[in-house]
Amino acid sequence: QVQLMESGGGLVQPGGSLRLSCAASEDIFSHNVVQWHRQAPGKQREFVAGILPVDTPIYANSMKDRFTVSRDNTGNTVYLQMNSLKPEDTAVYYCNVADQWGQGTLVTVSS
């Protein structure tokens, strides 16, 4: 079973930026859609962004102007660049591929 490992979360002030990373324990990104989801306290998990095997990005409408999903040159790591962060972006962010989920990384946006 593939293991997904997210990293890059932390505390950031409103308006700040963070880059999240998702790495897999085996080569699975190159032929699957890789998605980012998030779950805020007391809310359902929601789709944030994804990247298709042909490197086409897809975004939730509310995030496409501030978030960018990309893949590194090796294809083994997928990133989520988040800019102009807002307090409502506070959530645990998860990587998902082929029905597998990582453990999540916490993003807290607060002054």
Image (cartoon, helix red, strand yellow):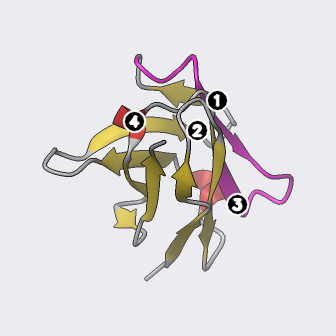
Compute the Cα span from label 3 to label 2: 13 Å
Compute the Cα span from label 4 to label 1: 28 Å
For the residue pair 84 and 97, the one nearer the viewer reads as 84
Image location of residue 79, percent across then percent down: 66, 49
Image location of residue 32, percent across then percent down: 54, 52
Which residues are the magenta region? 62-79
Q: Which of pointers 1 and 3 lies earlier in the amino acid sequence? A: 1
Question: Is 47 located above or below residue 30 in the figure?
Answer: above
* Mark identifier at residue 87: 4
> Is residue 111 on the magenta stretch?
no
Question: Is 47 located above or below residue 72 in the figure?
Answer: above
Residue at the far front: name it: 111
Label 2 element class: loop
Q: Are marks 4 and 3 in contact (CB under 8 Å)?
A: no
Q: Which residue is mark 2?
A: 52
Residue at horizontal 43%, vertical 60%? 106
Identify residue type, mark 2: Leu
Residue at horizontal 27%, vertical 47%? 40
Res 96 seen here:
no
Q: Which residue is mark 3?
A: 77
For the residue pair 53 and 44, the one nearer the viewer reads as 44
Mark 4 against mark 2, which lies toward the viewer? 4
Report the quarter where the N terminus lies: bottom left
